[in-house]
Image (cartoon, grey):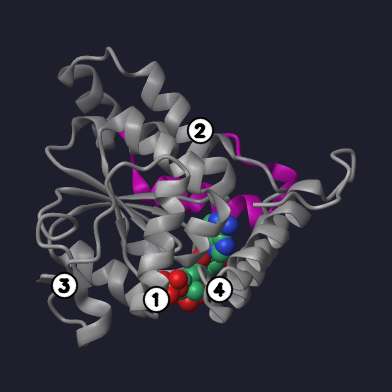
Amino acid sequence: MTGPDIPESHPRYESLLTRHRIEEGVDLGITSRQGLIAQGRGEAFDYLLGEETLPSADEAERVAAASLLRADHAVLSVNGNVAALAPGELVELAEATGADLEVNLFNRTEARMERIADHLREHGAEAVKGLDADGRIPGLDHERAKVDADGIGDADVVLVPLEDGDRAEALAEMGKTELVVDLNPLSRSAQSATVPIIDNLIRAVPNMTAHARELADADDEELDAIIERFDAETALAAAERAIREPDDADDS
Ligand code: PTJ
């Protein structure tokens, strides 16, 4: 992708870069036009959160990394926004944790599925799932229910960044450990997650990879202890507090 002409010293550099990536994703036929709206919602929450990773989000990212490492079969779900914002970073997270990558779209079209899979391959992905669509998530209408039977269908741990609430709830009902990245702590996706990560995807993914690398030699007991100590409600409450009472900040 071409870089935007924004000086790194600009106070809103990260936000402008993110907008540029989403815009370019639309131009490339990767991101849906609804993705622009989703980006705007996300930006508003990021602004309220101070555009930085809260300590509670950093902890959730470590727990997510431990969950991916501990999984029998982990899958990172990729939609049009995620593919535009952090394709190379997701490939690195998949490599660091042994997870599969699967394209899974809210507004599914075959053309966009193919383009996103190609885009991930251009960023170093070796295998990309999602195109077989031979599995279904129960309780959703036909197009939105499609998954790969040997991908999300079979996974015990799934990372679903920027997921819509319906599908997040349906995946949770399938008993999967669901790691959700969403800047809105009140969204149904965040609320139904096993591990809600209230952070911007562009900060969350590299930080999960850093945690995964640091935990690469940890044994199962250590990973289990990290996972068991985590409390989703506390993490959600810390993010909500950071928005409502910024002066108290997140001191968890
Ligand atoms: O590519 P598709 O067809 O799968 O569609 C993807 C979108 C994201 C358009 C679709 O899933 C959708 O409409 O999502 P929603 O219901 O708008 O939810 C998106 C959520 O992601 C909202 O709660 C936003 O606050 C949040 N969000 C947006 N940008 C980011 C974000 N969270 C983390 N990082 C971001 N950069």
Q: Is residue 112 left or right of residue 248?
A: left
Residue 106 coordinates in the image, percent (x, y): 37, 76
Q: Is 149 drawn above or below residue 134 in the view shown?
A: above
Of marks 3 and 1, which one's residue comes earlier in the chain? 1
The answer to whether the residue labelled 2 contacts the one labelled 1, judged by CB atoms less than 8 Å apart, is: no
Residue plotted at (49% across, 48% down): 87
According to the picture, the residue beneath numbered tag 3 turns out to be: 137
Instruction: Give the CA distance from mark 4 to mark 3.
Output: 22 Å
Task: Give how far apart the Cα atoms at labels 2 and 4 are.
Answer: 23 Å
Sort mark 4 into few (<14), some (14-19) or many (20+) by Cα contacts within 10 Å.
many
Q: Is residue 178 left or right of residue 38?
A: left
Say if disc 4 is inside 8 Å of ligand 1.
yes
Label 1 environment density (alpha carbons within 10 Å; few <14, some 14–19, many ≥20): few
Q: Circle 2 sits on which residue?
A: 207
Mark 4 sits on what residue?
35
Name the quadrant containing residue 61: top left
Which of pointers 2 and 1 indicates the residue nearer the eye? 1
Q: Earlier in the sequence, mark 2 or mark 3?
A: 3
In the rendered structure, which disc, 2 or 4, sits on the residue that comes first in sequence?
4
Q: Nearer the viewer, mark 3 or mark 1?
A: 1
Q: Is residue 110 magenta?
A: no
> What residue do we see at 39% from left, 80% from top?
107
Q: CA distance from mark 2 to mark 1?
A: 31 Å
Label 2 SS: helix
Q: Position of residue 222 (x, y in %)?
A: 23, 18
The answer to whether one can see residue 199 in this image is no
How many C-alpha atoms fall within 10 Å of the one at disc 3: few (<14), some, or many (≥20)? many
Residue at horizontal 21%, vertical 62%?
Answer: 172
